[in-house]
Image (tube, helix red, strand yellow):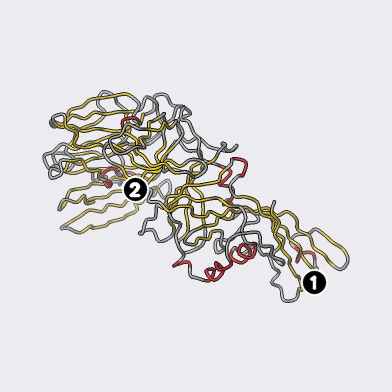
Amino acid sequence: MLLLKSSFPTFIVKISLSLLPLLFISSFVRAQVKTGIYKVEHHTDSAFINTYFRPYAQQNTNPDLNISTFYNYQYKPLLDSAIGVRYVVVINKNDPNNKEYYPIQMVWLNQHSPDNFHITYSDSLVRRYVGMELYIGKQRNYWNPARPFFNNGFIWNQAFDNYSSADSYRYQLSDSNFYSDKNLFILKSKKFELVSDSVKVDSGTYYSYPLGDFGYRTAKKYLSYKQAFSTFKLKAAKAYQSFLYFPVDVKFYNGATGSDQFKQLYAGDFIAVTKETDEWYEGEHISIDGQVTPGRIYIDDLWIGKRKLQTINGLQLRIKYSSYPEDQSFPDASVPILGIKIYKNNKLIQVIKEPGLVNDTTQIIHPVDVNFDGYPDLQIYSHSGGAGPNYGNNYYLYNPKTKHFDYHQKLSDLSQPAIDVKSKTISAAWRNGAGNWGSEKYKWINHKLRLVEYYEIRYLDEDQISETHDKMIKGKMRKRTRVVREEELRQPF
């Protein structure tokens, strides 16, 4: 264990003190974490650590008291050294419209599995590497971990979450536990352990907390803390787009285009994708020692499951779906669709990857003219509402110009959607517990899906209900809210 004292900095490392001027640069211009491969280091300059990352300080602010506080810091690796992580692969998924934070996706190239991990999907998946998602503050220097929704098949290390959880001894929101420069970033735990809290008064030493409650007016307080941090130095900047996990053994073609030369990769491994086409995933395989091999994977090699053929409007849809439900604890649960290949006259014209779930193998895809333009669109089941309603579908609308089906986000976000061809409207309904529910009605106006009517009720108590009814009249939404009894409710649609 590395022991550092704030009053007598010991220089253990390797990060130049030239970084110190950067400490005072506004967080608005701080460099974001780059996409690439990083080397993990557990040692750094104590002066840098203790200057930039303000330590926990509980100074007595009473001017009548003369109390001095001295700190002693013990540091340990943030990434568990027992699992043998030397390199991590990082993808920055910044959304310019999000002003608060940006997510980074991180895969640890660990040699061994951590003791504390969480399996998020089927137990049949082989898991080799830890996958984490971190939220990095844009306005403040903080980081928080999250469950990795970017891909299944990776290990979620639950122990890592403890470093940002609430505790008696932790940073406040205004304090820093993250730092980034153009070629490195540092994560330091928000949570840390108080090793000892000793107070020296006159010639005696007492253990007490808080000090002021015991009536001492002059004293010296000695605090020892143990914190975790790790430095990540950029080894190579990359243009990775996503991580692709392998649920099965695959051939990784690493020769020239058209060559049959390949390297065998095994279930549980992954590549970092740089380009995706209808037929191939192109990217790089990174070994645990940071070595990179470029290549490509044929999409069909990953689509291992059952097949289903459907014909819609003269198009042949070849559907591949998994043999296993997403959650094996429910054998009758829906299974994921791996992909759809769409052919016209035996010529491949489009590939749709992971478009939804199968809950009826008789008819997986439902053709419906959802935008009322005369062309059938694709309706695919996406999720269940659990014990209640709020189920949903994914919608792919046919584009007669490109002759492709385009995913429609707004339609796919609707809960309990219903298509009314006669009135050319789309309705949705939702429920938020027993005392709050509502419905919505949409129309296509100038080729855009617009809300034209909204209804909601909310129970205030046993006798009073808040009823809201908004309706578009002459192009403008007219809003009305009233408090009524249950027998006075008037649901408009």
Observer-side mark, 1 or 2, equals 1
Please give left or right for residue 304 compared with residue 100 in the image: left
Q: Residue lying farthest right?
A: 203
Please give left or right for residue 94 compared with residue 190 in the image: left
Q: Quadrant of the C terminus?
A: top left
Q: Which residue is depicted at the point 57% across and 63% down?
A: 175
The residue type indicated by label 1 comes to Arg
Number of numbered callouts drawn: 2
Query: What residue does disc 1 label?
Result: 217
Query: What residue does disc 2 label?
Result: 457
Where residue 482 sits in the image (x, y, percent)? Answer: 32, 54
Circle 2 packing at 10 Å, graded few (<14), some (14-19), many (20+), is many
Where residue 394 sits in the image (x, y, percent)? Answer: 28, 39
Q: Which mark is residue 76?
A: none
Residue in the foreground of this view, choosing between 118 and 456: 118
Residue in the foreground of this view, choosing between 233 and 255: 255
Q: Which residue is depicted at the point 55% across and 64% down?
A: 174
Residue in the foreground of this view, choosing between 459 and 261: 261
Using the rendered view, name the quadrant where residue 396 is placed: top left
- Secondary structure of the residue carrying tag 1 is loop
- Secondary structure of the residue carrying tag 2 is strand
Q: Which residue is depicted at the point 48% across and 42% down?
A: 131
